[in-house]
Image (tube, rainbow, N blue to C red):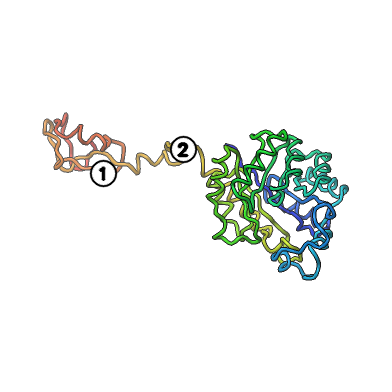
Amino acid sequence: MKKVFVIAEAGVNHNGSIELAKNLIDVAAEAGANAVKFQTFKTELCITKNAVKADYQIDNTKDSKESQFEMVKKLELNESAHEELIDYCRKKNILFLSTPFDHDSINLLDKLGLEIFKIPSGEITNLPYLRHIGQLNKQLVLSTGMASLGEVEAAIDVLIKAGSQRDNITVLHANTEYPTPIEDVNLKAMITLGKAFNINYGYSDHTNGIEVPIAAVAMGASVIEKHFTLDKNMDGPDHKASLEPSELIDMIKAIRNIELALGSQIKQPSPSESKNILVARKSLIANKDILEGEVFTEHNLSVKRPGTGVSPMRWDEIIGTKASRSYKEDELI
């Protein structure tokens, strides 16, 4: 059974602190995530000085007057921080991932040896960016928030033409609102993505709670990504739409249970229930005393537990035949 790849999205919830980032790694590792993911960027290369914040960023940060540039600049992790966090992840036996937001950051993560590259929803229409990542021929995870089916198709085509293998690309259905209103999730679109492009698919979740990613696993998601934080009340753009540690643990536990519950496509008695077959099923029994040579009829036969005798599925075969011996009432035929 192929396990669901769970990405615990730390993002920028470290608030620029290496120690907080390490605490987030601890939480992700203890929760059983496959990977913990951060964000790699040089603010000057991906945001203009006068770019405004999104509404959710304004709501979730204390300084409503600061620009998006000023907010994001405080959340950068430099190369040495990346090296330190990668080393810490190795010690914690969890995979380090990060989303690059500019060309320098793509090169940095490639230099640091990352084998999986996460493409965020905001870059799905960034041709030079997609071409750059596609040329690396890495494992790619492409988020599709805010995108139409045609835009997803165009992005996949760019990645493949640049040198990536289709089998190495996983598309994630996503909604880029923090938190996502439950009525806007449109989880069935995840299946549409997989079928439309004959490609691996999963789900990146921004709803409150854990039920939607669990449902996505039940629907066949191979990758789940979910933001988490140490405390939802911390100052920062993404904390309020993130899971707290206990919630992350509950989500991953539920995902692993759903994996087990999905099983195979073969319908057959399971080992645990097989012992109950003879107890729960029924057999043909004598409804009254039956003498040797008497004809079995629907009046002198009945069906009762246990299932250790002749199966009731042979009812038509037995009716009209003669008893080879005598039976007492309630005796198995």
The residue that mark 1 highlights is: 304
Q: Identify the residue at horizontal 83%, vertical 52% (top origin).
A: 45
Left or right, 271 with reference to 53: left
Residue 271 shows which numbered tag? 2
Amino acid type shown at disc 2 = Pro
Q: Identify the residue at horizontal 80%, vertical 65% (top origin).
A: 67
Q: Quadrant of the N terminus?
A: top right
Where is residue 28 shown, x and y percent of the image?
71, 51
Secondary element type, mark 2: helix
- Sequence-wise, the earlier of marks 1 and 2 is 2
Q: Name the residue furthest right.
A: 80
Relative to 87, is 266 above or below? above
* Residue 51 visible from this viewpoint: yes
Q: In the picture, residue 327 is in which quadrant?
A: top left
Q: Identify the residue at horizontal 88%, vertical 48% (top origin).
A: 80
Where is residue 85 shown, x and y percent of the image?
82, 48
Left or right, 287 with reference to 267: left
Secondary element type, mark 1: strand
Q: Quadrant of the C terminus?
A: top left
Q: Identify the residue at horizontal 84%, vertical 39% (top origin).
A: 111
